[in-house]
Image (cartoon, helix red, strand yellow):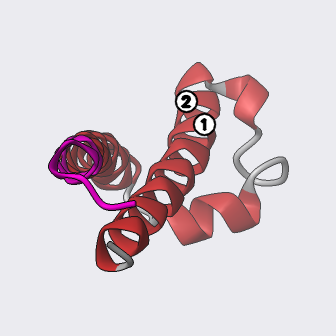
């Protein structure tokens, strides 16, 4: 059943997801610039050339990547829910 309240609530969730994605992407970009490598290269080398235990920032980088994936999935789900209304 479609209601305005339902659409407004999902719209709010979309806004929250987009905001979180921008925040996490910014943190990831900052690390990419700081270390001079892309996240893809970092993830390929995680535990090898760039052991996370050697630098706590690497732990946070990996965590941010997982968080970004989470928020992107949530955004896709909410956008699909809006389309289905």
Name the quadrant containing residue 79: bottom left
Name of the residue lying farthest toward the front: 1
Q: Which residue is mark 2?
A: 60
| Quarter of the image where the C terminus is located | bottom left
Q: Residues within 10 Å of mark 1 (few under 14, many from 20)?
A: few
**Looking at the image, residue 39 lies above or below residue 59:** below
Pointer 1 with pointer 2, Cβ within 8 A: yes
Please tell me whether residue 29 belongs to the stretch shown in magenta: no
Q: Which residue is mark 1?
A: 63
Residue 47 x, y percent position in the rendering:
83, 47
7 on left or right of 50: left
Q: Which residues are magenta?
A: 1-12
66 on left or right of 57: right
- What SS does tag 2 mark? helix
Residue 49 x, y percent position in the rendering:
75, 53
Residue at 72% x, 34% y is 52
Residue at 56% x, 50% y is 70
Name the quadrant containing residue 9: top left
| Quarter of the image where the N terminus is located | bottom left
Q: Nearer the viewer, residue 5 or 31?
A: 5
Q: Nearer the viewer, residue 44 or 13?
A: 13
Name of the residue lying farthest toward the bottom: 83
Inter-mark Cα distance, 1 to 2: 5 Å
Residue 42 x, y percent position in the rendering:
60, 59
């Amino acid at each position: 059943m479609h209601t305005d309240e339902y659409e407004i609530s999902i719209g709010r969730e979309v806004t929250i997801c987009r905001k979180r994605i921008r925040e996490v992407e910014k943190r990831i970009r900052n690390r990419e610039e700081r270390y001079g490598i892309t996240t893809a290269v970092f993830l390929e080398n995680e535990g090898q050339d760039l052991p996370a235990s050697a630098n706590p920032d690497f732990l946070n980088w990996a965590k941010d990547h997982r968080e970004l994936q989470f928020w992107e999935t949530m955004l896709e789900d909410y956008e699909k829910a809006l389309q289905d209304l």
